Image: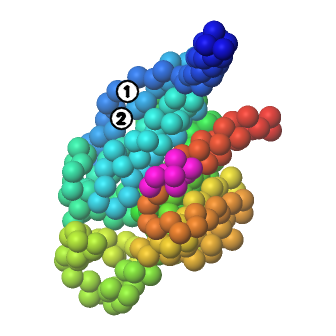
């Protein structure tokens, strides 16, 4: 019986090794890439899979007050599966950033200009396939990525918005209802932004922009998000011509634990499905 047990253990060990090898992912390199916009520097990290190019790319945009590390798990998930990923710091986008600028100079429109500059730079790299560039943004980064998709629809292969802050325009209107009397500095979520933040947020309606993006859109949003209510994403899912909204039951603003792991899988599956679609 002892001999039989050893045999079973040996078989289990072989199966474990076989499974581990089957699940082995693509290796990737990480390098710093700086992009210029109007004389200012945008810092970012490019993860390049060790695979034959040109490669598809996901550009990841962080949320309000955060930095390029905010979405690192998503970037590494893409890179391990043969998809290049570029995470960057918006100019003035947060407190601990490596890009130029301060938060008092930042708005959704300055961030949209940053993302547009990044998009142009990445599309020109020989390692990247310019026809297969995706956007992924979280919170305010999801808002900005949605704006970019609506204003540059021909350049975006697909859009992923994580708990997007479509609510921010209504928040600005409530905080400073008179656009002619916006104070020079504004307190927002414990941080200080400048007049430009609310002025730019109130200068257009995101729901007028996003219908101009005909490509596939995936929105992931928690049902208990108290910062960016899911009702705004429900409206966006109707406004986009080709969008899917996945509700994360009980999740708040930001995904953690099992929700975080699931959102990484959902995002990866979305990109892979588009890349594997013979019509693309």
Instruction: Tell me the SS state at disc 2.
Output: strand
Any part of residue 211 in sight: no
Any part of residue 13 in sight: yes
In the rendering, at what x and y percent does residue 96 appear?
21, 51
- Find residue 111 and report its image quarter: bottom left
Position of residue 222 in the picture relative to residue 107 (left or right): right
On the image, numbered disc 2 is attached to which residue?
A: 45
Position of residue 47 in the picture relative to residue 44 (left or right): right
Above or below for 257 versus 235: above
Q: How many marks?
A: 2
- Find residue 230 and report its image quarter: bottom right
In the rendering, at what x and y percent does residue 145 appear?
50, 56
Above or below for 118 versus 24: below
Q: Are marks 1 and 2 in contact (CB under 8 Å)?
A: yes
Q: Residue at x 50, y 73 (%)?
A: 224
The magenta-colored residue range is: 256-263
On the image, numbered disc 1 is attached to which residue?
A: 30
Residue 203 located within the stretch drawn in magenta: no
- Which numbered disc covers residue 145? none
């Amino acid at each position: 019986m002892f001999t039989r047990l050893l045999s079973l253990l040996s078989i289990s060990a072989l199966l474990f090794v076989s499974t581990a090898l089957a699940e082995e992912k693509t290796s990737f390199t990480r390098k710093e890439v700086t992009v210029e916009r109007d004389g200012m520097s945008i810092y970012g990290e490019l993860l390049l899979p060790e695979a034959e190019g040109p490669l598809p790319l996901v550009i990841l945009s962080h949320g309000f007050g955060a930095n390029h590390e905010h979405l690192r798990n998503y970037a590494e998930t893409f890179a391990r599966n043969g998809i290049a990923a570029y995470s960057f710091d918006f100019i003035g986008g947060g407190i601990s950033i490596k890009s130029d600028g301060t938060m008092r100079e930042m708005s959704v429109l300055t961030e949209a200009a940053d993302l547009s500059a990044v998009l142009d730079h990445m599309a020109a790299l020989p390692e990247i396939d310019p026809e297969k560039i995706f956007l992924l943004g979280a919170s305010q980064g999801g808002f900005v990525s949605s704006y970019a998709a609506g204003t540059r629809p021909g350049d975006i292969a697909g859009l992923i918005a994580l708990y997007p802050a479509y609510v921010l325009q209504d928040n600005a209107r409530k905080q400073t209802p008179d656009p002619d009397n916006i104070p020079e500095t504004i307190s927002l979520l414990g941080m200080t932004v400048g007049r430009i933040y609310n002025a730019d947020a109130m200068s257009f309606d995101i729901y007028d922009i996003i219908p101009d993006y005909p490509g596939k859109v995936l929105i992931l949003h928690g049902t208990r998000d108290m910062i960016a209510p899911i009702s705004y994403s429900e409206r966006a899912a109707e406004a986009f011509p080709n969008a899917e909204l996945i509700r994360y039951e009980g999740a708040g603003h930001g995904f953690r634990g099992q929700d975080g792991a699931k959102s990484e899988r959902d995002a990866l599956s979305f990109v892979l499905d588009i890349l594997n679609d013979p019509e693309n």
